[in-house]
Image: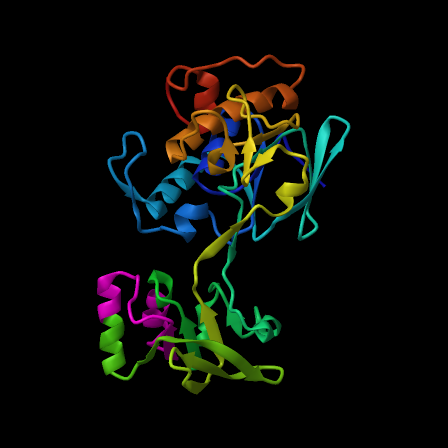
Amino acid sequence: MIKTDALIIGAGPTGLFTAHQLKLIGLDCEIVDNLDKIGGQCIELYPDKPIYDIPAIPECTGEELTNNLINQLKPFDIKFHLSERVEEVKKIDENWEVKTNKGTIFLTPNIIIAGGVGSFEPRKFAPKECEKYEDKSIFYSIKDKTIFSGKTVSIFGGGDSALDWAVELSSKSKVNLVHRRDEFRGAKSTLDKVYELEKAGKINLFTKYQLKTVKGDGNLKSIDIQHDNKDLKTLDTDFVLGFFGLIMQLGPIANWGLNIDKKTITVDTEKFETNQKGIYAVGDICSYPGKLKLILSGFHEGALAARACFKLARPNEKYRFEFTTSSKTIKNRLGVKGD
């Protein structure tokens, strides 16, 4: 069992900044996220999309913002539990016992839900038989690209992820790129490269096709794709990759006894606490009068929630607000030298 002053659910920008604020005031925290990487929506949905509403930063991408927030956390030793989903929360005396799908158990007086509008899960292929090949021959994200070397890979999707991986894998693999439309949503420069590789015979391009069925014994052998005109093609393939974006699920949070309205959680605007003492919600998942779904609003919410955590984590101590510009204690926590 892991004991911590606060558990943050969600490793997106709001969760990362909330962790910074907790550590700044001397509290420990750990972060759990259903995704396999840090960054939340910014990394999964728009890593290259420009963001214009971060104070003092005229423009940055989702990836740049995430990297800057990670750098901001470097003075602190924060443990991330990625590819883990919180499944169960129950009250034990003055603490919350939190269990994940991997069996990790936390004991904490404070839970901060910073999970965007829920946990992200990949959109999957419709054919039911795909399930038995998932994480073996069919993937919705790539963790180790070396497994595709020298193999035939069929990639489905029309956005940046599908195009980028088609280009990337074409140097060492035979690539089929399948999209249900003629038009692609990815960057023009990448699309031009795909067409160039198609002409060179490095990529086989199939538009207006969708996956109909998969075939194999213990291993995937081939797939059938169907055109809009019902024409069927069989493609020999070793692996299938699907890049259809993410769907957002509230998941087990819906069963925690929180005040939920239209997949958002109602909070107060003093502590951003929910109707359950010691459980807070910040970022897109929380709602209150005048709520703005902006990253900068999430930063403000996280800062106030962090201060509220202090009372439950250190009931015998009085929280004393200190300016980061003048506090020697805070400078020590940040590893800042000098006066």
**Residue ID at (59%, 72%):** 128
Along the line of sight, the residue nearer the viewer: 53 or 127? 127
- Horizontal side of 312 relative to 56 (left or right) equals right
* Image position, residue 286 (x, y; %): 51, 33
Above or below — where is 271 with respect to 73? above
Identified at 46% across, 46% down, the residue is 40
Task: Name the residue nearer the viewer: 154 or 232.
Answer: 232
Question: What colour scheme governs how the chains and residues are painted in the rendered image of this protein?
Answer: rainbow
Q: In this picture, is 184 found above or below 273?
A: below
State yes or no: residue 138 in magenta. no
User: Could you say where residue 250 lies in the image, as x and y percent from the top left?
Assistant: 57, 45
Q: Is residue 62 visible?
A: yes
Q: Which residues are magenta?
A: 163-192
**Where is the N terminus found, in terms of image quarters?**
top right
Q: Quadrant of residue 74?
A: top left
Q: Position of residue 275 (x, y in %)?
A: 63, 27
Q: Residue furthest front?
A: 229
Q: Position of residue 254 (x, y in %)?
A: 63, 42
* Residue 149 seen anywhere in this rendered image of the structure: no
